[in-house]
Structure formats: C-alpha cells, structure tokens
Amino acid sequence: MLETYIFRPFEATLETKRLVLRPMLESDFDSLHRIFIDTKVMESFDHPPLTHEQMKRWLKRNLDHQNEFGYGLFSVILKQTGELIGDCGLEMMEDLGAAELGYDFRSDFWNQGYATEAATAVRDYAFDVLSLPQLISLIRVGNIASKRVAEKVGMELHNKLSRYGTQYWQYVRKRPQIKTEAK
C-alpha cells in the first residue's frame, strides 16, 4: 500500500559542484531528444533511438508526472557551459510502491562522474526534503555503468525482476534513520 504524501509543485533546483539540476521543461525537448537518439545511450535500454513522436510522448509523460507527484526528472545542466547533458530524478513506480531514482546522460559525458554527482543530489533531496521512505533503481541486467552509479549512491541489490519482457536488477536504499541523542 502506498503512503500518502503532501506534495508541493515541482519547483526545486539542486546544485552540485559542477551541475545544476532544475525541473524539466517543454523547451528542453531538443536537448533531451539528443540523448535519446544517441545509439550508445539507447543500447543501454536495448531499444532503438526514439523518434520525434516517441520523444514527445516521453517528455509529456514526465511533465505530467511532475504535476501529479510534485517531483520528477530534473534536467541536468553543466555549470561550465550551461548545456543540458542529461536528466536525473525520481519517478513514482506505483506498482512497486516506491520512487525510482533514474538517470540518462549523453554518451559524450559518460565516465566523468556526472551521473553519480547528480544521483547523489537527487537521493539527498528525496530523503531530506521529500522524506521518501526508500528509493529504488531498476537497471537493465548487464548495464554495469548504471549498476556502479546505484552502488556509489549507497543502493544495494535487492532483487531481479522482469518488466515488459526485460530483466532488471532492482536496487534499493532505505531512508537513513535520524539518530537522536538520549537525554
């Protein structure tokens, strides 16, 4: 059973040493589409590049999610250049009863620590601001780079499951308990 939360509109902006994470906008379409037409990126999903129409539906679904839940995917902006290099954020997986921490980055920005940096900021936001009880990440079996990111942000392998005919590793991180000093 899902817990009930009171959400505010998705207006958060997160900042790390090298990145700004801000709510995704319709105007991000071209920059986001560039990620999902990258064959290297799409190989990690075992899916062909997204068409213009598929990308429009993907973006609409994510913007609708933001409006419904008060959180969603952030557009990840590189501070140094101001360019959008990826997305990272949360999606409620109602059938699993938890928010998924997910990330997608242009392949020319892989292996530079950006996904871990962004995922760490989102993890902290999920626990410290949204007070979510746990996070999950569903990673296609064999996607070692995404598996490493999940592990670097403190997630542990919990399960292997099948969704829509694809095998996934399910990683989980529970919200840390706040220690209170005895008086």
Image (cartoon, rainbow, N blue to C red):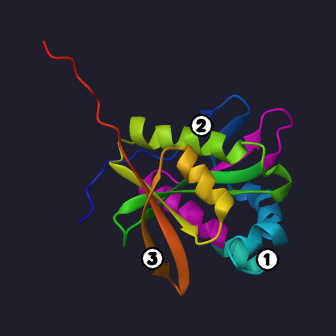
The tag earlier along the polypeptide, 1 or 2, is: 2
Secondary structure of the residue carrying tag 3 is: strand
> Where residue 168 sits: x, y (%)?
52, 73
Residue located at (54% from left, 50% from top) = 151
Residue for point 37% across, 51% down:
134
Name the kind of residue labelled 3 in the image. Answer: Leu
Q: Earlier in the sequence, mark 3 or mark 1?
A: 1
The circle drawn on residue 161 is 3
**Amino acid bearing label 1:** Pro
Of the two numbered discs 3 and 1 in the rendering, the one whose residue sits closer to the viewer? 3
- State the residue at coordinates (71%, 80%): 47
Amino acid type at mark 2: Thr
Q: What residue appears at the point 83 percent right and 72 percent down from the top-left corner?
A: 39
| Residue 18 colored in magenta in the image | no
Check contact, mark 1 vs mark 2: CB within 8 A. no
Real-space CA distance between mark 3 and mark 2, rounded to the nearest whole angstrom: 33 Å
Query: In which quadrant is the C terminus drawn?
Result: top left
Helix, strand or loop under label 2: loop
Q: Label 1 to label 2, Cα distance in Å?
A: 29 Å
Magenta stretch: give its range: 58-84
Q: Is residue 55 above or below residue 18?
A: below
Q: Give how far across and how far down residue 129 sits, in percent.
A: 41, 36
Image location (x, y in percent) of residue 92: 44, 62
Tell me the number on the disc at residue 13.
2
- Residue under label 1: 49
Q: What is the distance, in whole Å, between disc 3 and disc 1 at their CAs?
A: 24 Å
